[in-house]
Amino acid sequence: MAKELWYTEKGVFSPGFQLNFKIKESLHKEQTPYQLIEVIDTYTFGKMLLLDGLVMLTELDECAYHEMLVHPAMVTHPDPQNILVIGGGDGGTIREILKYPIKKVTLVDIDKRVIEVSQEYFPELSKGGFLDPRVEVVNADGTQYVKEQNEKFDIIFIDSTDPTGPGAVLVESDFLKDGAANLVEDGIWVAQSESPFFAPEFLKTYTNNLKKLFKIVKVYLTEVPSYGGVWAFTFASNKIDPLAPKRTAPFHRILRTGLKYYNPETHQACFTLPEYLRTLIT
């Protein structure tokens, strides 16, 4: 009888919790100067990308993450043309942004091997986007990039790993200040913000730091089974409320692009928070 192979992810904020994935085969493994990159093929979730032992995406449920990271901001900004993505080397965020008639999107990821490995093993996420002439890829430290460049962006997406290793500095106050300074007057900041169940103090601190920089700060939710369930994002702006009725009208721009998760009803519902979370961030 063949021995079963399983991959175990241990929680960053919850050491007493772990996720187990039954593996068909290991497809790729390498240590870069920044992190350990792995690609495995699983029975339930399909191919899976891991960085430093943590699940970044799976074929089954990546739509619930990437669509919900991108579309609430893209449909609420009146005219998003110049976009910045920090992280996101797998290409999923770029794929969703390019469903809109933008002029330019800049992706800053410190590790070019994440981009290269994703292009090889997840072409449905990455290949088309990285070949698009509207996309500029910068392999650099995201914190240094926002500190040193003077360009203004309509939306900044923080598609980072968990706040450990290379992703740790992307939640610090100095980075948030530098990022806010790189937004236009009606710009939007969106960041993946961990599990509200397993990382409540992180989410509370992060939203409090954003409230020092932005007049409107809202948390919204999605469901990513391979991350352990409910997952949070943070939306911040000085001008734009994502729940203002007039802001969801541009949805027709992406209505026929084959979305799997996001729709106008989901947009409204995702900002309705359970009581424990509403109380936490109030």
Image (cartoon, rainbow, N blue to C red):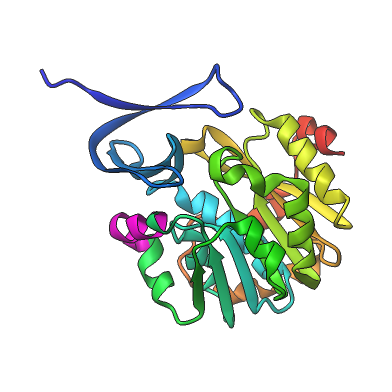
Which image quarter is the C terminus in? top right
> Residue drawn 62% across and 42% down?
168
Which image quarter is the N terminus in? top left
Q: Is residue 20 left or right of residue 245?
A: left
Which residue occupies the foreground of this view, 68 or 193?
193
> Residue drawn 41% across and 41% down?
50
> Residue drawn 33% across and 36% down?
44
Is residue 14 one of those drawn in magenta? no
Where residue 80 sits in the image (x, y, percent)?
67, 76
Picture layout, residue 232 above or below residue 135: above
Picture layout, residue 81 above or below residue 25: below
Q: Is residue 109 left or right of residue 241?
A: left
Overall secondary structure of the magenta stretch? helix
Picture layout, residue 82 above or below residue 34: below
Picture layout, residue 204 above or below residue 108: above
> Residue drawn 55% across and 16% down?
16
Where residue 76 sits in the image (x, y, percent)?
72, 68
Where residue 27 sits in the image (x, y, percent)?
24, 44
> Is residue 275 in view from this perspective?
yes
Q: Quadrant of residue 6?
A: top left
Q: Which residues are magenta?
A: 114-124
Q: Is residue 171 left or right of residue 35?
A: right
Q: Residue furthest left?
A: 1
Q: Quadrant of residue 142?
A: bottom right
